[in-house]
Amino acid sequence: MPPGSSSIESHLACAARLRLCVARTLASTRLALILSGDDDVAENLDEQTRTMARSEISSPSGRTIDRFFADVEQSLPAVLRAVLARPSRASINTTLSALADELRNELTHGSDDIFGVHIDAAQITANSYYQSSTGDSTTGPPVTLEPWTQDVHVLRCDEQVAAKVPPDSPSRVELRFNALEVTDDVVCAVPYVLLHELICHAYAGIPSRGSRTCEAHSPFSEGLMDYVAGRILAETLEGRGVAGGVAQMLPDTFRCLAVGAAYQSARYESGTAFGRREVAARKFGWETGGALERCFLPHLGSTAFFSWTVCVNASDLPHDDRDTLVVAIGRVLTQIRGLPNEGARTTERVRLVEVLGGLSDPAAVAAFGGRYLDEKWL
């Protein structure tokens, strides 16, 4: 197995350790709250700890790896002594705050063991495509782990693991995950989840260091560039492209591809985290990306398509102009599809690629978008 990778069972064992840490803190908090007199909250936490005690985690073969609650009682005496020694409300709050910090530290440390190689794979891939496309040696922002501990079984993908560039701190990317839902599929989703955030958002407007915040319905950032991120991931995990060597880092590239595709598909489903407007705009951008890549394929190939989209994304083109560009390209492609024979369609696709490739600066890109919103291509 490649260095830095880990087996499915070791992932699950680490997940069990994280859950055990959560169980300890729940039990400790329950004791502190009982002593401070908040009976209703204590009763709720008591139920949570009983639920944790009944929980088990199993390997794919069905063998139980660990019980989350196995040694919770061992952690109680020290906490109990600390609370009894400092019985005031302020002291209890201080104790609970320290426990929360300890929990976060242990969760983050344990998560490094689980996610480390998958985070590295996404960062290396994004950096490679950005640098090879733009000639800029800038590397992407660091990834920080942000665990949460909601003791429920979640169904939505983005409630299990998600990535985000914080608006107040655009120099980093947060990988957020539910520490109680760390499964092998969650681990295998990390390359897509992070690659989307890096390719679509973290590298947006890098030369100008401008705002990387876009609307959830952006057909460019959340549609076309998400299509690009998915295609780059597939190419990389298949051992091809400028970052093809990354595939050797991961223990299960096939599963990463399958899970990544499922997470990507969820972004285009109505009734999930997104409304109809967001889904429609994203689908339009995604479909436009696919059609545009097919225009590049016969003569320049996918690499040129990736380079062009990454460069546009890295420019200081305003978000509204990016979205206008996608709408204009979509309209041009619709006109081309309406031509009566394949020879004519091929000629116009080649012309479109040549025109787009000749747009040398953000102003020219914006002008193209504005022009073909109103004018016909043919």
Image: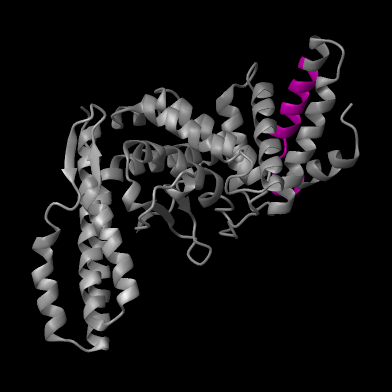
Tell me if residue 242 can be seen: no
Q: Where residue 121 sits in the image (x, y, percent)?
A: 36, 38
Compared to 305, does 122 lie above or below? below
Q: Nearer the viewer, residue 162 or 221?
A: 162
Q: Where residue 230 sits in the image (x, y, percent)?
A: 52, 33
Compared to 278, does 28 lie above or below? below
Q: Tell me the residue at 34%/74% (across/down).
A: 40
The answer to whether residue 249 is left or right of residue 324 is left
Q: Nearer the viewer, residue 42 or 325?
A: 42
Placement of the C terminus among the 4 image quadrants: top right
Q: Nearer the viewer, residue 94 or 108?
A: 94
Compared to 231, does 148 lie above or below? below
Q: How is the image coloured?
A: one colour
Q: Main secondary structure of the magenta part?
A: helix
Magenta stretch holds residue 140: no
The answer to whether residue 355 is left or right of residue 32 is right
Tell me if residue 102 can be seen: yes
Q: Where residue 135 sits in the image (x, y, percent)?
A: 51, 41
Q: Which residues are magenta?
A: 346-364
Magenta stretch holds residue 361: yes
Q: Nearer the viewer, residue 308 or 233?
A: 233
The answer to whether residue 354 is left or right of residue 79 is right
Q: Tell me the residue at 22%/89% (across/down).
A: 88
Q: Where residue 363 sits in the image (x, y, percent)?
A: 75, 49
Number of marks in picture: 0
Q: Tell me the residue at 22%/76% (across/down).
A: 32
Placement of the N terminus among the 4 image quadrants: top left
Compared to 80, does 359 lie above or below? above
